[in-house]
Amino acid sequence: MAMSLPDPPILVITDRGQCSEPIEARAEKLFQGGCRWLSLREKDMDAGNRLSLLRRLIEIGAGVGARVSVHGDLEAALRLGASLHLPAGSNPRPVRNLVGSTVFLGQSCHDDAEVQAAEGADYVTLSPAFVSPSKPGYAPFLSLTDIAAITRRSALPVLALGGVTAENLTALANLGIRGIAVMGGAMRTPEPQTWFSELAARWRTTIVRSPSAQP
């Protein structure tokens, strides 16, 4: 049985290249704004430094009960007991067998076939939903009709990813998504605490109250 999503179900993904301050400082401010789910995605960082940073983020997040994940680093997740997010094209089933049932496991997906193949994960991200400044030129985009059809077919919670903002969140209402994932906005904003608080408030009023919102 899949583990439940954090509350609010908003996954913040790190990118220190877009951030004007150390990731630890940014994470602390996001947590102060209500963030309870952050994933370290610094693929160009050497394994030792990434492990050290992940450890610090886990310590910071523990103070507010936040879940901290790492993107694509199975060894770091096992060493620190962190949640793990797998890149597109991975097979979650053998990873699940290795990490056990207590590790929160996610998978990046870009179409219905990948979502259907993600058995063993606790959730999937589905992208790209909108034009994203973090990945200029990235395409093709999923239509809202595509997102709705994929989420209806999925046995796992689906998080919309790619260009999601408080302003366009309304477009995702009634599509069956269970959460959202964000990166660039969270990393670039000069006011991360306020930024996240406003995004979470919009999530609660726009998606949670929509007729098709799932329990």
Image (spheres, helix red, strand yellow):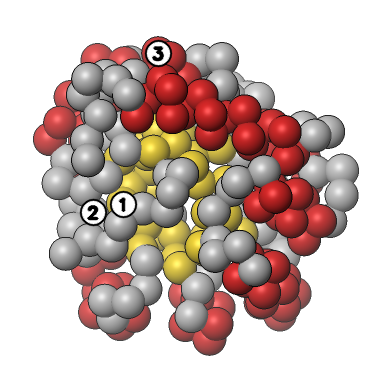
Q: Amino acid at mark 1?
A: Tyr
**What residue lies at 50% left-to-right and 73% top-to-bottom?**
82
The secondary structure type at the circle numbered 2 is loop
Taking 42 as reference, is 123 left or right? left
Residue 88 visible in the displayed image: no
The secondary structure type at the circle numbered 1 is strand
**Mark 3 or mark 2: whose residue is earlier in sequence:** 2
**What residue lies at 73% left-to-right and 40% top-to-bottom?**
193
Which residue lies under the disc numbered 1? 123
Q: Amino acid at mark 2?
A: Ala
Q: Number of numbered discs present?
A: 3
Quadrant in which the C terminus is drawn? top left
Which residue lies under the disc numbered 3? 171
Q: Which of the 4 quarters of the picture holds residue 44?
A: bottom right
Which disc, if any, is residue 50? none
The crowding category of the residue bearing disc 3, from other C-alpha atoms within 10 Å (few below 14, some 14 to 19, many at least 20), is few
Q: Position of residue 162 (x, y in %)?
A: 50, 30
The secondary structure type at the circle numbered 3 is helix
Front position among marks 2 and 1: 1
* Image marks 3 and 2: residues in contact by CB distance under 8 Å: no
Which residue lies under the disc numbered 2? 118
- 156, 74: nearer the viewer: 156
Taking 7 as reference, is 20 left or right? right
